[in-house]
Amino acid sequence: MNGADIDQGAQARLREDKVLLQRFQRTQDPQLRDELVRRFLPLARKLARRYDRADEPFEDLVQVASLGLVKAIDRFDASREVAFSSYAVPTILGELRRHFRDKTWSVRVPRDLQELALKVERALGELQRELHRAPTVPELAQRVGASQEDVLEALEAGAAHRATSLQSPRGSDDEQGDTLGDTIGTAEDGFQLAEHRATISALLDVLAPREREILRLRFEEDLTQEEIGRIVGVSQMQVSRLIRRSLTRLRDAADR
C-alpha cells in the first residue's frame, strides 16, 4: 500500500468519524456513543500507556482515559471544522491528570514525550518568528515530524517538564540549606476555597455545556483563547465574546 492509499484511507476514516459524531449529536443515541467509544478507544489506550507505572494497574488508567473519551464525545460540537482527536486529546489527558492529582501522585512524563515536548517547544518559537503568529497544531506536527495527537500531548507535557522541586535550594550561595518550600506560607484557606467551589458549581448550571467547557479550558486548563478556538472550532474573537458573556451571566446569577 503506497502513501496515497494511506492518505485516502485516513480521509475516509475522518469522514466516517464526522458522520457518526454528527448523528450522535442529533440523536444522543447510546448505541452510537458506544460505537464511537470503540472507534476511539485505541487513542485512549495510547494516552493511558504513556503514563503507565508499576504502582498503578494499567487497566485502571485505561478506564480513566475512557471516561475522558466519553466526556469528549458528549461535549464535542460536530458542526465545527475541527478534528475530534484535537478536542479529545486534551480532555483525556486532563482526566488522567486529575486521577493522579486526586491520588496525590505526580505525573511522570515518559522520556520520549519529554524529548518531543522539547522539540515542539523549539518548533513553536521558530514558527512564531517565521509566521509572525502562533502556529497551528498541524503546522507544529509537520515541523517536528509527529502526529497531531502526539503534538497535543507534548504541549500538555511541556508544563510538567518545567516544574521545579520545592526541595531545590533557594540560591546557589545559600549556606543555610533553605529550600523553596521554606518560603511558602502555611495559612489554611482550604475551607474558603471549598465554599467557593461549591458556589461556582451551582452557578455554572446557568451556562450551556459549550460555555462551561470554554471556561474550563480557559481557567482550569489555562489555555489561551487562540488554543481554545482551535479546540472548539471558533475564532479567537468568538471565544473572547463567549467568555465575557459567560462571566456576565455568572455575575448576574450570583447577584440574585
Image (spheres, rainbow, N blue to C red):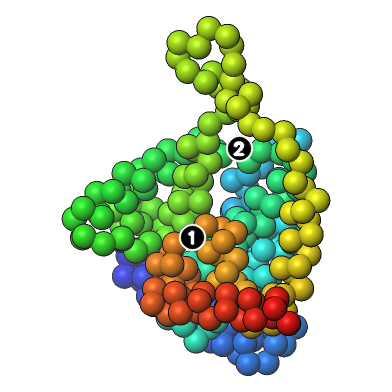
Residue 201 placement, left or right of 88: right
**Which is more toward the observer, 109 or 174?**
174
Residue 219 occupies which quadrant of the picture? bottom right
The quarter of the picture where the C terminus appears is bottom right
- Badge 2 amino acid: Arg
With respect to residue 202, does 102 lie above or below? above
Q: Are marks 1 and 2 in contact (CB under 8 Å)?
A: no
Mark 1 to mark 2 CA distance (whole Å):
21 Å
Q: Nearer the viewer, residue 198 or 148?
A: 198
Query: In this rendering, is residue 104 above or below 127?
Result: above
Return the x and y of residue 157 as percentages of the image width and height: 51, 46
Could you tell whether 121 is left or right of 101 in the image?
left
In terms of secondary structure, where does tag 2 sit?
Answer: loop
Q: Which residue is mark 2?
A: 108
| Vertical side of 215 occupied by 112: above or below | above
The N terminus: image quadrant: bottom left
* Image point (53%, 7%), residue name: 175
Pointer 1: what residue? 223
Q: Position of residue 215 (x, y in %)?
A: 57, 69
- In front: mark 1 or mark 2? 1
Q: Earlier in the sequence, mark 1 or mark 2?
A: 2
Can you tell which quarter of the image residue 7 is in? bottom left
Residue at 47% across / 56% down in the picture?
A: 152
